[in-house]
Image: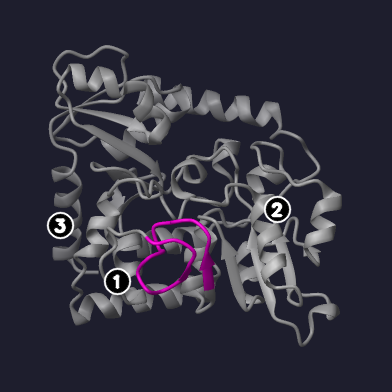
Amino acid sequence: FTVLQWLQLQRRHLQQRNGYLWAPGLTLWKSAILKPFLRTPTNRLSFSRRCTAASACVVWGVKGEQQWRAEAQRKSLPLWRMEDGFLRSSGLGSDLLPPLSLVLDKRGIYYDATRPSDLEVLLNHSQLTLAQQMRAEKLRQRLVESKLSKYNLGADFSLPAKAKDKKVILVPGQVEDDASIKTGTVSIKSNLELLRTVRERNPHAYIVYKPHPDVLVGNRKGDIPAELTAELADYQALDADIIQCIQRADEVHTMTSLSGFEALLHGKHVHCYGLPFYAGWGLTVDEHRCPRRERKLTLADLIYQALIVYPTYIHPTRLQPITVEEAAEYLIQTPRKPMFITRKKAGRVIRYYRKLIMFCKVRFG
């Protein structure tokens, strides 16, 4: 990583955030995590509910867009959406852990298949140089060997003896009220529907069902009754590390889960029952077609645009833009957290403590 590349990274970060940015309606927690990703030495940033001189309105995801679209239109402001990136943290966002990466999308958002996004445009026009291809492959190798994922938590996992000589299919569960389910699915829209469909089409396979960690710890919606899981899946990997589950599977079947993208990095066959950002490019087996996705991509194209170009990575203590490689090394050095599936909610004391820390960051810098 050269000085020139570092300067290019800093300049791009500044140029993407020019002007007076207005980010209304956010909680103190969201304001705190967005501030280092939005504020630059050359722009202005306001989190107030009213702003008269803004040049762009920044919201959190599709939900924030729905809430503030009319006001942004009334003020003739472009609407920019932010969301978690694909290498996020060592632990869950719903447990109020700050992210290492976020995405800023000025067209749509990567999980909304009903319209274009900046990521989709990048992928449609991707033309990598040899150096960029090599960088993408080197990054893929580093992520695979270090077993990095979005949340980087969970225990070791190995297949039971009963799985021997059978095709192993991993079915990752999702948060059912998540925006990616509402905007990225077509026919199958629940974990139970997905699991039932996979079993019907693969009656002799060994199916491993991996509930989403946010659902497991009781923070989000998407639980399947135990008796139905036992009927449709051969094994339920509760607190397992998702990457170890992927490594031991032959195929991954998903609606829109990021686990499908992570499985592609590990060379697995991925079946998509919805339209996640990585579907429709010739790299996955797709249940549905997205006519906007016009070409076949290499895995290097997908990695380069989705992990290197599209997200912003901010160092958690220096609060400066960093590369994906630096972010990966930071996560590698961060101790992995266990998943406490016995609790219904993250400990209230811990959550209040984190909220207090975030308040101090917003109020005092």
Q: Residues within 10 Å of mark 1 (few under 14, many from 20)?
A: many
| Amino acid type shown at disc 1 | Asp
| Amino acid type shown at disc 3 | Leu
Residue 127 is inside the magenta segment: no
- Determine which of the numbered discs, if any, sits on residue 7 in the image: 3
C-alpha gap between disc 1 and disc 3:
23 Å
Residue at image point 36% right, 50% down: 110
Decide which of tag 3 and tag 2 comes sooner along the chain. Answer: 3
Residue 333 visible in the displayed image: no
**Dominant SS type (magenta):** loop
Q: Nearer the viewer, mark 2 or mark 1?
A: 1
* Residue 307 in the image: above or below residue 137: above
* Residue 321 in the image: above or below residue 164: above
Name the residue at the bottom extreme: 165
| Amino acid type shown at disc 2 | Pro
Residue at image point 23% right, 41% down: 106
Q: Position of residue 34 (x, y in %)?
A: 36, 34
Which one is in front, 123 or 104?
123
